[in-house]
Image (cartoon, rainbow, N blue to C red):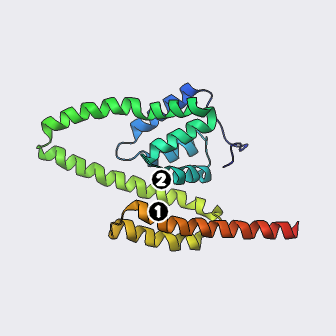
Amino acid sequence: MTDETPSLARPSSERELFVAFTLLALQGFGGVLAVAQRVLCEQKRWLTREQFVEILAFGQVLPGPNVCNVALMVGDRFFGWRGAFAALAGMMTVPLVIVLAITMAYSHYASNPIVAGALKGMGAVAAGLIVGTALKLMSALRTNPMGIAACAVLMAPAFVSVAILRWPLVWVLLGLGTVACLLAWRRLRAGSAAAAESG
């Protein structure tokens, strides 16, 4: 991962990280990843899309919520462990208070059909946000060492395994992830060998 890219900005302090991740978390009802990509790459310009995809890929294979892992890695990237703590605290503090308040309200109104219908509608919106983010991040595949065709070939069995066959994600990651890592390593090795020969 490259830390310095000339066209990118960087947060001025841990406080800015905390505020940015707090506001990010408050926009993300039903799924923060869609908002995280827009805020971190387009609004704040702290990361390129490629860097975001790379951080997200690490966040998905590590234990814990993806977006919390992303917050930790982005915070650490700029201010070490203090930045990691500030970003994670921003991601968790205010939403935790809101969730506790909503939980108390939901326990009282859960049987109301209007509340149940509203929650189903929010689920559909969250799914749409995730699909939109995935489509927006597809452009980052152009610079992937495996190439778009290999990514598509691996994406299809991953989708079928998790979404249709309902296999545990950990086994799908171990199986297809290992194949993807080996393929990327092989392509990178071949590319560096070709560069060494031409240089």
**In the shown orientation, is residue 142 left or right of residue 19?**
right
Give the foreground label among 2 and 1.
1
Q: Classify mark 2: residues with Cα within 10 Å, few (<14), some (14-19) or many (20+).
A: some
Residue 33 lies, in percent from the top left, at 45, 48
Label number found at residue 173: 1
Q: Which residue is mark 2?
A: 60
| Kind of residue sitting beneath label 2 | Gln
SS of the residue at dot 1? helix
Query: Which quadrant would the C terminus be assigned to in this image?
Result: bottom right
Would you say the residues marked 2 and 1 are in contact, meaning their CB atoms lie under 8 Å apart? yes
Looking at the image, is 103 positioned above or below residue 34?
above
| Residue 101 position within the rendered picture, expressed as x and y whole percent measured from the top left | 25, 30
State the residue in front, 35 or 158.
158
The number of numbered discs placed on residues in the rendered structure image is 2
Mark 2 secondary-structure assignment: helix
Q: Amino acid at mark 1?
A: Leu
